Amino acid sequence: MTALLSSHVITDIQQACDRLVVLGVGQLLFDGRIAEALAQHRVGPGSDIREVRAETEVATFAEADGSLSTLHRVAGAPSEGVRPATLEEVVLGYLVAGRTRRRDAEAA
Amino acid sequence: MAGAKGAGETVALRAIALTKRYRRRIWALRGVDLAIPAGSVTALVGPNAAGKSTLIKTWIGFERPTAGSVSVFGIDPWRDRAAALAQIGYVPQSPSLYRGLSVTDHLDLASDLRPGFDASTARDRLERLDIPLDSRAGDLSGGQQAQVHLCLALGTRAKVLLLDEPLASLDPLARREFLNVLAKRSDLTA
């Protein structure tokens, strides 16, 4: 049995799914196993200053309390003040990255 | 088929450079490459109007790619829709039951239209969920209609389930019950 389940509810996805595909306005933003996605990403404090962006950075997004967090791919990610990413943060990070790329492309 | 996804893995759903454009201007999908392995349960996430439903509909042959291609176990649904659909159980985003027909009528209809449809399993599931089988579909709540759709899709015993936001209208118990079915791959074959 193979299933593809579209949903907005991350807790549902974590219960039932082993893979994740993130789509943002027609473009594929992420495709991979959920266990690997969680193992390969970290979250640290965010900054809205573009210049300080590390190469490992996927995107910076606002948490529910308004503070900024940055999603990093693990290899080479800063080790101070980072913690494992939640699935919701992985999804948010890639959605924000996709939106930023789209806006940059439109502006260019 | 091998490469980064792992050697020997069978691909259930494939998209190659899939592009869909509406009325020449609105891009629903742009160059999407995907290989969903057989046996996986994959979440499809994205904002509204991200193209999720369009993507799902290309695999059932409801949408024709503007460019690129899709396949279901190697079958192009646009060239051989019947063969592709035989592999698929589909639950649309909004319930599309026949309002005037009862739940039992829907089971009978599915049995007539779909070879191998497992009406008794579908009926057992519906009874377990307290869905009144004699009710007209139009008299059921939105959540109950979604449950009927899910039971019809499960009853197909299809190799691939395409579920377009099936959980949104379900109550917490019904939702948990269905997620357990997916997570355990129970009530399902192939």
Image (tube, rainbow, N blue to C red):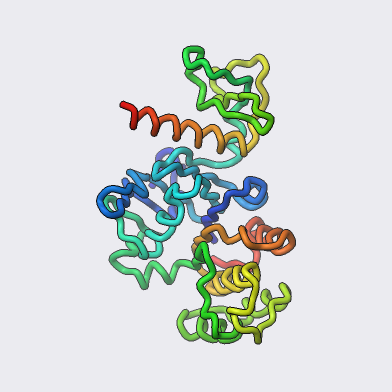
Pick the residue in front: B144 or A13: B144
Return the x and y of residue B149 as percentages of the image width and height: 57, 71
Residue at (63% x, 79% y) in the render: B139
Return the x and y of residue B177 as percentages of the image width and height: 70, 62
Q: Is residue A105 above or below residue B23?
A: above
Quadrant of the rendered image containing residue B144: bottom right
Return the x and y of residue A32 as percentages of the image width and height: 51, 41
Residue B22 can be seen, yes or no: yes
**Screen quadrant of the N terminus of chain A:** bottom right
Residue B8 can be seen, yes or no: no
**Screen quadrant of the C terminus of chain A:** top left
Q: Is residue A23 above or below residue B65?
A: above
Residue at (69% x, 77% y) in the render: B131
Pick the residue in front: B52 or A1: B52
The mark tally for this picture is: 0
Residue at (63% x, 62% y) in the render: B169
Q: Judge left or right: residue B137 versus residue B9.
A: right
Residue at (65% x, 72% y) in the render: B141
Pick the residue in front: A25 or B184: A25
Return the x and y of residue B108 as percentages of the image width and height: 54, 86
Quadrant of the rendered image containing residue B165: bottom right
Q: Is residue B121 above or below residue B14?
A: below
Quadrant of the rendered image containing residue A45: top right
Q: Is residue B65 above or below residue B102?
A: above
Q: Judge left or right: residue B110 versus residue A103.
A: right
Q: Judge left or right: residue A31 versus residue A9.
A: left
